[in-house]
């Protein structure tokens, strides 16, 4: 059954890049299987000092598997995409490894998790300005820190942040960050507000009129803000709805709107 489910998740076109970077792990030896769909649309692109009218609608489909064992956690993810530049095809595949340094659930002052992600970006996606990829092979190091506030035997709210540095097989490095605040209602409903930033350290402005080969050499900036609502069913599955908007953009698509839906189903080994 596990093999069939793994093949289903990795082969069906359902989702967006959504690796789990928060500083808490899922339950011990419980596989987190998730299918996701994200829609993205925008009407213009920032190109340094000018704005270029360019309308595009994009769809992203992702399957992922995550497993925690003691103080380590691993996740694999595969994404297909369909954009204004290409029909449905492979977007990227990535693997993430994380290590729990501190855990406030067992009495530490905060939860701290260090990790790294390795990503293979396929050519169709790398050459599309809609996705913020920098090279064919990418590596990211990240550190997450957070604090939970408990009520009875569970958490009622929590806040956390992630900071990271990325490099690719060509171009300049980039930095990224995410901050979030979450509220938990009786372990059946959750609400999250978040902001995510990506800053490329390249030297060039984006030129949409020449062949594009990723953001590796582009001095790009983006800040996305959004909300997410999660609901747990009786079978312990979680349905999530996400809405986000790009509040700041430089040398990348601007005023981007995002809508996402995902379903996470956990099961033990």
Image: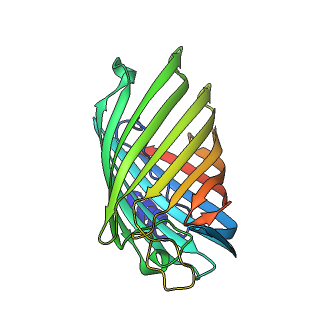
| Residue 93 percent across, percent down from the top left | 40, 67
The one of 73 and 87 positioned closer to us in this rendering: 87
Report whether 240 appears left or right of 154: right
Count of all numbered marks drawn on residues in the image: 0
Q: Quadrant of residue 43?
A: bottom right
| Residue that protrudes farthest toward the bottom in the picture | 210
Q: Quadrant of the C terminus?
A: top left
Report whether 259 appears left or right of 134: right
| Residue 21 percent across, percent down from the top left | 42, 44
- Colouring style: rainbow
Could you tell me which residue is drawn at 52 percent across and 68 percent down? 131
Could you tell me which residue is drawn at 57 percent across and 79 percent down? 208
Check the image and report above or below for 227 versus 75: above
Q: Quadrant of residue 50?
A: bottom right
Check the image and report above or below for 154 versus 196: above
| Residue that protrudes farthest toward the top in the picture | 152
Check the image and report above or below for 82 versus 145: below
Report whether 45 appears left or right of 200: right
The one of 40 and 2 positioned closer to us in this rendering: 40
The one of 25 and 112 positioned closer to us in this rendering: 112
Could you tell me which residue is drawn at 47 percent across and 70 percent down? 11
| Residue 244 percent across, percent down from the top left | 65, 51
Q: Quadrant of the N terminus?
A: bottom left
């Amino acid at each position: 059954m596990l093999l069939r489910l793994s093949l289903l998740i990795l082969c069906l076109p359902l989702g967006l890049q959504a690796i789990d970077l928060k500083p808490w792990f899922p339950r011990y030896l419980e596989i987190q299987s998730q299918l996701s769909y994200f829609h993205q649309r925008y009407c213009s692109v920032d190109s340094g000092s000018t704005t270029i009218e360019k309308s595009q609608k994009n769809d992203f489909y992702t399957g992922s598997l995550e497993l925690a064992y003691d103080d380590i956690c691993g996740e694999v993810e595969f994404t297909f995409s369909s954009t204004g530049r290409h029909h449905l095809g492979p977007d990227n595949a990535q693997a993430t490894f994380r290590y729990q340094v501190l855990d406030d659930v067992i009495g530490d002052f905060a939860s701290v998790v260090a990790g790294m992600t390795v990503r293979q970006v396929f050519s169709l996606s790398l050459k599309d300005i809609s996705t913020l990829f920098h090279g064919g092979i990418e590596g990211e190091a990240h550190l997450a820190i957070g604090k939970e506030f408990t009520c009875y035997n569970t958490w009622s709210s929590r806040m956390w942040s992630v900071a990271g540095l990325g490099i690719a097989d060509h171009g300049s490095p980039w930095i990224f960050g995410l901050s979030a605040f979450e509220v938990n209602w009786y372990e059946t409903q959750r609400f999250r507000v978040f902001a995510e930033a990506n800053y490329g350290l390249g030297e060039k402005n984006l030129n949409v009129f020449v062949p594009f080969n990723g953001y590796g050499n582009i001095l790009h900036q983006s800040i996305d803000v959004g909300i997410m609502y999660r609901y747990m069913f009786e079978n312990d599955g979680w349905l999530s709805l996400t809405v986000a908007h790009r509040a700041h953009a430089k040398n990348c698509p601007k005023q981007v709107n995002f809508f996402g839906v995902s379903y996470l189903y956990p099961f033990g080994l």
